[in-house]
Amino acid sequence: MNYLKVAIIGCGGIGLKRAYFLPQNCKLVACHDVNDTAAVSFAKINNCHVFKSWRELVSEGDIDAVIIATPHNVLSEIAAFAIRASKHVFVEKPAGLNSKEIQKLISIRNEFQRIVHVGFNHRYHKAVLKAVEMVKSGCLGELMFLRGRYGHGGRVGYEKEWRSNPKLSGGGELMDQGPHLIDLSRAFLGEFSEVSGFAHTYFWDAPVEDNAFMTLKTPDKKVAFLHVSSSEWKNIFSMEIYGKLGKLEISGLGGSYGVERLIYYQMLPEMGPPPTTIWEYPMPDNSWGVELDIFVEAIFSNVNAGFGLEDALATHKIIAEIYKESKYDYQS
């Protein structure tokens, strides 16, 4: 196999980004979207064939891998169909509406032995990769806790979009930006054994929550304090990681979230004001492409080295606990 023949299902903003960042050893050959106009426009930009039905597209024998960038309610259905059709699958987070859907996908993946990657692109931001490298180096010492905030201000009509419809989204802000904060917290602190929190609708006239607050604890009491919001008004991404020897602060994601930046605060033996080192990444966000490179390399090597369904399952279990505490029953 010299190159992969790839299809994209979901021709919106995320689908367009994945198409733009496809590795050179991939060829985009097909696309589908429920919006015919979007699909035709996407096909013209990317010189690929439009399929009227995603089932027809996936059943096409001359496709090696499928990228799924649809609303949440059909992610797992399409992924399951594609795996059974012997396609490798890249499915955007959260990969399904709930834990049951993810567990079913894990069983199907294990049966058909396909590479399945879940799109947690935030793990591949330059500041995050640098932070992971520094934590592994030991410069922070033993980690204690982290704080994370992720929020945006919505837009006129936001409460009428698919993300505000629980049948399509599976939840509100906790299912939208929440998975990224939860996943990054797991990357730095490990698995969480205690989960508590609160989700609530404060502003948007919608049947889903617009804010969620979480306290997640590991067995050795490392803690993640997290807040996701769609009433932030000024877009924000912030994660502070505290160790016994220093602190890392990640901020910005580029664009409206501000320049991506990592700050290292080094604790001195005598304490006092810490020496500070700052890395800035003003270049365009290439996390979408880095993640696809890993997915494609996994296919060629037949070794799934990226983040997959088990990561999505861990995230879903935490989200379900928060919804249960908050008496939201989207996933019942």
Image (cartoon, helix red, strand yellow):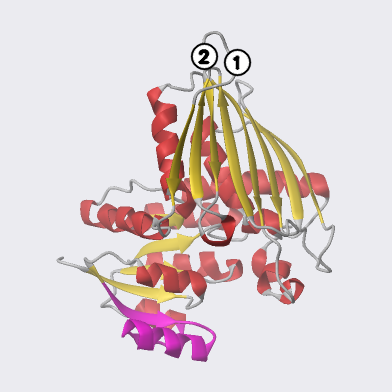
Q: Is residue 332 left or right of residue 143?
A: right
What kind of element bears circle 2? loop
The relative height of residue 241 versus residue 4 in the rendered view (above or below) is: above
Q: Position of residue 37 (x, y in %)?
A: 50, 91
Q: Nearer the viewer, residue 224 or 324?
A: 224
Q: Residue at x 74, y 49 (%)?
A: 212
Question: Magenta includes 95?
Answer: no
In the rendered image, is residue 274 in sight? yes
Magenta stretch? 27-53
Q: Nearer the viewer, residue 182 or 241?
A: 241
Res 115 → quadrant: bottom left
Q: Residue at x 73, y 56 (%)?
A: 232
Q: Is residue 180 left or right of residue 111?
A: right
In the rendered image, is residue 115 in sight? no
Q: Position of residue 176 (x, y in %)?
A: 63, 59
Q: Residue under circle 2?
A: 268
**Numbered label attached to residue 272:** 1
Q: Position of residue 123 (x, y in %)?
A: 46, 47
Q: Residue at x 48, y 57 (%)?
A: 105
Res 28 → quadrant: bottom left
In three-dimensional space, the C-alpha distance between marks 2 and 1, rounded to whole angstroms, equals 7 Å
Residue type, mark 1 in image: Gly
**Numbered label attached to residue 15:** none
Q: Are marks 2 and 1 in contact (CB under 8 Å)?
A: yes
Question: Magenta includes 49?
Answer: yes
The quadrant the C terminus occupies is bottom right
Residue placed furthest toward the top: 270
Q: Nearer the viewer, residue 234 or 194?
A: 234
Q: Position of residue 142 (x, y in %)?
A: 51, 19
The quadrant the N terminus occupies is bottom left
